[in-house]
Image (cartoon, rainbow, N blue to C red):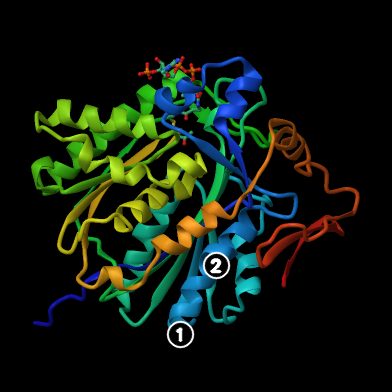
């Protein structure tokens, strides 16, 4: 009998908005102690997209270096996960497909279930590659977290994208079979069709996240998953990094296993600076763990994905030998350092400028430094360009 191929994440890259707001400035402007954001929420900054940036441009920017490294051969599926959809019908991935020059022989679809969509895409991609290990699947998770101005949720905004290539014999992370899942109908966070900001019941969302975590964990163990003591590092979905710390403590309490904060803190390195990137957030955390100083070869990483509404999934990945060869940390740090610092007034102006109305044509200048731009609206359709 043939040994089944090892399947998992072959490559991964991060992108974000080109502007950054320091949360100390937001704290001062809103009369809040900066320590509430830095310590209480565990956030330092949040990325803000420029007027010519959105989920499509960030998604393309995340995927471009992966295609530069590996080419397009074997990519017959592009899964685009987002809860910041730009059209009710057309998948955002179709714009990205053109911008990236992917071949026509490629299925493209958009996936939605709040912040969980990227993990749904990962599980589907593994299924596709299991059926035909010659195929590779490109996943793009891209989101802009937007809440109302002057709300408690305002400091937990952010913007980012992660692209991943799923393949047989992967360079980065093998994803073994046992996975734990949990779903319940809860109104903790949602975005109605007539709103471009999310509705959120803050405290309820924290409780729902923790219930989803223990529920998914129990199912993971019931499916034959390993004990918490056998997991070397953890990434939990990070709407704000303190939430992931709460989850980590909850897992320790739930399992009775002592889980030091050192097994979770490396995962917060980038998210503290990017803010919430919804579907991308968990994979931004994974990028940070893989970029940490320690040699993780052979280590098992636990990943908890949460999407309000609500779905949770816990699974693990085992780090592959040679994963450090593709230097990612330098590129990601450079990307974060290159963002343009903006004032609270500038951030609020960008917050207000998101186009809501497609009935009038709109031209948007390519003002951001990246290669991909939202160029505006004509004939009620969105237009994109690549430099
Ligand atoms: N110094 C240090 N810490 C301080 C402080 C100070 N000066 N002032 C307050 N704090 C601490 C508080 O004690 C609190 O800590 P604990 O959590 O340990 O109690 C923390 O800062 C936050 O303070 P509050 O509870 O008073 O915060 P808040 O009510 O103003 O808002 C929030 C917090 C509810 C998370 C709000 O930001 C929010 O609604 N965010 C959006 C929803 C969200 O992210 N939910 C997470 C789960 S849902 C999910 O994961 C899906 C998703 O991506 C959205």
Is residue 341 visible to us here? yes
Given residues 11 and 271, the one toward you in this image is 271
- Mark 1: give few (<14), some (14-19) or many (20+) Cα within 10 Å: few
- Determine the image quadrant of residue 350: top right
Determine the residue positioned at 67% across, 51% down: 86
Which residue shows up at 60% across the image and 51% down it?
339
Percent of width and height locating residue 55:
61, 53
Q: In the rendered view, would you say 227 is above or below 110?
A: above
Q: Which residue sits at x=21%, y=40%? A: 262
Dot 2 alpha-carbon crowd within 10 angstroms: few under 14, some 14 to 19, many 20 or more: many
**Percent of width and height locating residue 178:** 19, 53
User: How many numbered dots are placed on residues in this image?
Assistant: 2
Q: Which residue reaches farthest right? A: 360
Front disc: 2 or 1: 1
Locate ligand 1 by image quadrant.
top left
For marks 2 and 1 on the same chain, the one whose residue lies earlier in the sequence: 1
Does the rendering let one see residue 82?
Answer: no
**What is the CA distance from the residue labelled 2 to the residue labelled 1?**
16 Å
Q: Where is residue 95 in the image (x, y as percent from the top left)?
A: 66, 66
Foreground residue, 93 or 280? 280
Element marked by disc 1: loop
- Residue at 61 percent of width and 21 percent of height: 28
* Residue under label 1: 73
In the displayed structure, does residue 14 sit left or right of residue 199? left
Mark 2 lies on residue: 108
Quadrant location of the C terminus in the rendered image: bottom right
Q: Which image quadrant: the N terminus? A: bottom left
């Amino acid at each position: 009998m043939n040994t089944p191929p090892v399947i998992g994440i072959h490559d991964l890259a991060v992108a974000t908005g080109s502007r950054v707001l320091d949360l100390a400035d937001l704290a001062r402007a809103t009369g809040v102690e900066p320590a509430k954001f830095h310590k209480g929420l565990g956030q330092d900054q949040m990325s803000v997209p420029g007027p010519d940036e959105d989920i499509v441009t960030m998604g393309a920017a995340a995927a471009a270096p992966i295609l530069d490294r590996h080419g397009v051969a074997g990519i017959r599926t592009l899964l685009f996960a987002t809860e910041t959809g730009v059209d009710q019908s057309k998948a955002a991935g179709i714009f990205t497909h053109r911008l990236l020059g992917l071949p026509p022989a490629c299925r493209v679809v958009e996936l939605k279930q709040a912040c969980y969509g990227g993990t749904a895409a990962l599980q589907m991609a593994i299924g596709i590659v299991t059926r035909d290990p010659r195929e590779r699947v490109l996943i793009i998770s891209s989101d802009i977290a937007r809440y109302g101005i002057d709300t408690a949720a305002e400091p937990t905004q952010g913007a980012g994208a992660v692209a991943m290539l799923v393949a047989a014999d992967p360079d980065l992370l093998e994803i073994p079979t046992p996975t734990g899942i949990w779903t319940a109908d809860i109104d903790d966070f949602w975005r109605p069709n007539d709103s471009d900001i999310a509705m959120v019941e803050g405290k309820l969302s924290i409780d729902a996240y923790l219930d989803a975590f223990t529920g998914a964990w129990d199912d993971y163990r019931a499916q034959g998953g390993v004990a918490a003591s056998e997991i070397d590092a953890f990434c939990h979905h990070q709407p704000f990094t303190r939430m992931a710390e709460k989850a980590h403590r909850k897992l320790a309490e739930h399992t009775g296993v002592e889980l030091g904060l050192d097994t979770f803190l490396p995962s917060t390195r980038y998210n503290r600076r990017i803010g919430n990137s919804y579907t991308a957030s968990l994979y931004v955390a994974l990028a940070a763990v893989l970029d940490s100083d320690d040699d993780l070869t052979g280590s098992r990483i636990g990943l908890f994905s949460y999407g309000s509404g609500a779905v949770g999934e816990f699974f693990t990945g085992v780090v592959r030998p040679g994963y450090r060869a593709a230097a990612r940390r330098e590129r990601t740090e450079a990307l974060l350092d290159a963002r343009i610092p903006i004032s609270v007034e500038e951030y609020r102006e960008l917050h207000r400028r998101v186009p809501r109305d497609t009935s009038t044509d709109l031209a948007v200048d390519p003002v951001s430094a990246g290669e991909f731009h939202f160029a505006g609206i004509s004939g009620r359709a969105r237009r994109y360009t690549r430099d």
